[in-house]
Image (spheres, rainbow, N blue to C red):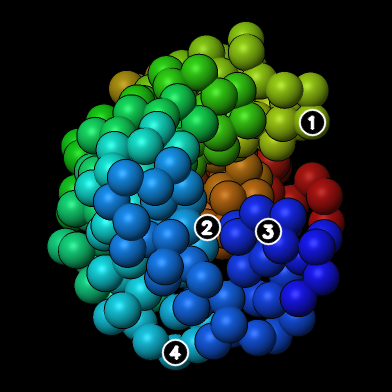
Amino acid sequence: MTSSELETPPLDTARRLAEDGDLDGAAAILGRLVADPQGPDRAQAAVGLAVVLEERGDVEAARAAARTALATGHPEYAAQAACHLAQGFEREGRDEQARAAWQAVLGVGTAAYVPLAHLALARLAGDLAEAEKELRAAMAAGDAQVGAHAARQLADLLLEHGEPGMAADVLLDALEAAPEEEVPGLRVQLGIAHLELACAEFAEAVEGGADAQTSALAIELLARILPLRGRGEDADRVWSYGLKHEDETLAAEVRLRYHRDS
């Protein structure tokens, strides 16, 4: 071993060995660092050991190393270790263990990892209320990029559950702080939310007993917007409702609107 190699910090040596494909050599160095409870690099070495062991296929030993890092409470490496555990459990479909690991990330409290943990907990949520709580927490965690992603996910959920007004409110709030590159996507979703709101208003106008001309206009607008939302069959039903309406004046107005593009 040369003098320069002797002067190289063990962590750097282990990293180089791992990059060169010598996982056993890297694991040996990292294992020695982890075995020293007073070592200044123990938390970082434990995370590195977890990664190396997982690459080597020793999943349970990798998780033991990650738990060692987590137990140190180090603000950076304990959080990384908890993320490592959580992601591994998610890949295996072990949702309860994954949730516990993401909660551990929140317990460490490192700001850079908190928004990601909330996003993950929303992904693993069992119902809308839980997912909404976690997505709102991700939006409030201070990372503008993650906040925009969380807002888009929450808007999608709210639209799926028939809450376009709430979705629009979420997106409007998100636009105030969103990074420039996120703005177009948020605006498109806001437009979709407004389309859904428009559909609801048009349907309400028809059901509310408006005059024939107003009802016919509402039927046409509703029937032409629904296909934009992938609801072609609903649009056909709306046209049919208007064309076959018992009010002949209304039906005649709808026929004119239905055939004017023919």
In the rendered structure, the answer to whether residue 19 lies left or right of residue 76 reads right
Q: CA distance from mark 1 to mark 3?
A: 37 Å
The label on residue 181 is: 1
Mark 4 residue crowding within 10 angstroms, few (<14) / some (14–19) / many (20+): few
Camera-nearest label, 3 or 4: 3
Which residue, given by chain and number where applicable, does mark 3 sit on? 12
What residue appears at the point 76 percent right and 76 percent down from the top-left corner? 1
Crowding near pointer 3: few (<14 within 10 Å), some, many (20+)? few
* In the depicted structure, whether residue 219 falls above or below residue 141: below
- Can residue 118 be seen? no
Give the position of the C terminus as an image quadrant: bottom right
Q: Which residue shows up at 51% across the image and 63% down it?
A: 48
Q: How far apart, in angstroms, are the residues tagged by discs 1 and 2?
A: 30 Å
Amino acid type assigned to the residue bearing label 4 in the image: Gly
Q: Secondary structure at mark 3?
A: helix
Neighbourhood count class around disc 2 (C-alpha, 10 Å): few under 14, some 14–19, many 20 upward: few
Residue under pointer 4: 57
Q: Amino acid at mark 1?
A: Glu
With 99 as the anchor, is 84 left or right in this view?
Answer: right
Amino acid type indicated by mark 2: Arg
The image quadrant that residue 86 belongs to is bottom left
Q: Earlier in the sequence, mark 1 or mark 4?
A: 4
Give the number of the disc on residue 231.
2
SS category of the residue bearing label 2: loop
Taking 14 as reference, is 12 above or below it? Answer: above
Q: Position of residue 246 (x, y in %)?
A: 36, 44
As displayed, is residue 89 above or below residue 208? below
Question: Reading the chain from its start, which is encountered first: label 1 or label 3?
Answer: 3
